Image (spheres, rainbow, N blue to C red):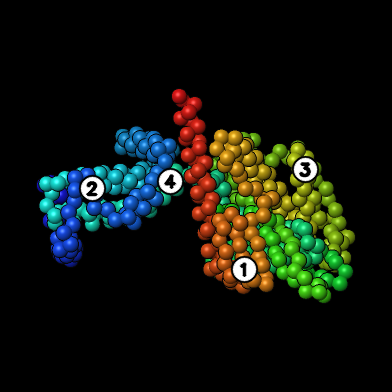
Amino acid sequence: MLQWRQRIGKLSLDVVSRHHRNAKRLQSTGTALQSGEQLLPAQTRGLAAAATVSPALLSRARAVAREHETLAKQLRIGFDAGVAKRVGELTPTARVLNEWDVAQTSIAELDKLLQDPSSDQELRSLASDEIATTLENLPDISTRLQSSLIPAHPFDELSCLLEIRPGVGGSEAGLFAGDLLRMYQAYCKHRSLRANLLKLEHENVSGAPTDSLIKEAILEVASPGAYSMLRSEGGVHRVQRVPATESKGRTHTSAVAVYVMPGLPSNPADELGEKSFDNPESDYYVNPGDVRTDLMRAGGAGGQHVNKTESAVRLTHLPTGTVVAMQDSRSQHENRAKAWQILRAKIAQQKREAREDELAQLRLSMVGIAKTGRGDKVRTYNWSQQRVTDHRSGITLHHLDDILQGGNSLDTIIDSVKGWLRERDIQALIADQEAAAAIKK
């Protein structure tokens, strides 16, 4: 009791005045607490329920906090770069877990005071307000605690490559591929991200403008962290609109595949350390003996030099059948370098996805958590309704023009998908922890 009176004494005058008004209101209505009754409004109970954290995740967080404490003691004895790095990785979880524990302790003490029939009315009014405030903060603490336990994606800090390929829908799909390319270019420009085209091929269709139909485009977003920002864009993007060539005004449905790959640094040994191009254990490693190189004469417009010299390069990764062809430059050396950059990015993404698929299948067999792959329909753009719907997060916006211009509405959709991904990652963490606990039993 003395503890809470001391805390009350430290409250600012305006807060104390508000508490006095609450106490007088309670006295005027004749409200009194019975033994075992809590002075908690319905919305406060809802906040408490919304702020729950899985026991499995709490167990994981406490294990992280113990490791953090142990390593921090080692650092106080002597500095070690590896230990310091690990401590930095564990610190966010340790800090937010401490916030969670402090809040839980505070709620328990306040609850005990509220249920004490010997407490005076004013003190219980103060405790009621304080417990409500604490509970209002719990959902945020809960979200931050769970998010801190999600392992960082290994490509999060890297730049990225966006490969855009038309799918079903004929020439309309090629037109929409161009719309998406311009959307991502505008998005990068608005956010000061460095972006440049690594590859752009057009489809030659009779009656269509030469540069209107895209066959394949690869946009490099060279800013660090771009992979994390745009990772959620991978998948099949569907468009519903009336093509310019449609004489009867019928709506057609077409699709474009967007593939997000990690952009690889020019000096991998310096920036990636062990994850260099020369380490066979690395995602980024490609055995040169597994790659067949073909030199060809470049096709399309470009003058005599482009069409008469073997400047085009095609790389084929024999184990996976992955093919990368590059002819954008007049220099064979530049085309070869770009082709290797794209091939390494594709192989790295494939290796990562293979591990994620294996883990997803294991989780699916246990708790029904599957993985959404790049072949799944992720978003629909409807011209007549000016509507964009993301089928993962469920968000729908009627701001098609702003989205296609890379505006804030596109940010809103991307953020909603990131929240959806975070929820799935949390479910996967819970499944992993519960499975590990079951094995120990």
Mark 3 element type: loop
Identity of the amino acid at label 3? Answer: Gly
Label 1: which residue? Answer: 387
Identity of the amino acid at label 1? Answer: Arg
Mark 3 surroundings: few (<14), some (14-19) or many (≥20) residues within 10 A: few
Camera-nearest label, 2 or 3: 2
Mark before the other along the chain sequence, 2 or 3: 2
- The numbered disc on residue 321 is 3
Identity of the amino acid at label 4? Answer: Gln
Camera-nearest label, 3 or 4: 4
Q: Horizontally, is 344 left or right of 436 in the view? A: right
Mark 3 near mark 1, Cβ–Cβ under 8 Å?
no
Mark before the other along the chain sequence, 2 or 1: 2
Mark before the other along the chain sequence, 3 or 1: 3
Mark before the other along the chain sequence, 4 or 1: 4
Mark before the other along the chain sequence, 3 or 4: 4
Label 2 to label 1: alpha-carbon separation? 50 Å
Label 4 to label 1: alpha-carbon separation? 33 Å
- The numbered disc on residue 146 is 4
Mark 1 element type: strand
Q: Residue at 69%, 40% (x, y): give it.
A: 286
Mark 2 element type: loop
Q: Horizontally, is 398 left or right of 434 in the view? A: right
Mark 4 near mark 1, Cβ–Cβ under 8 Å?
no
Label 4 to label 2: alpha-carbon separation? 31 Å
Label 2: which residue? Answer: 37
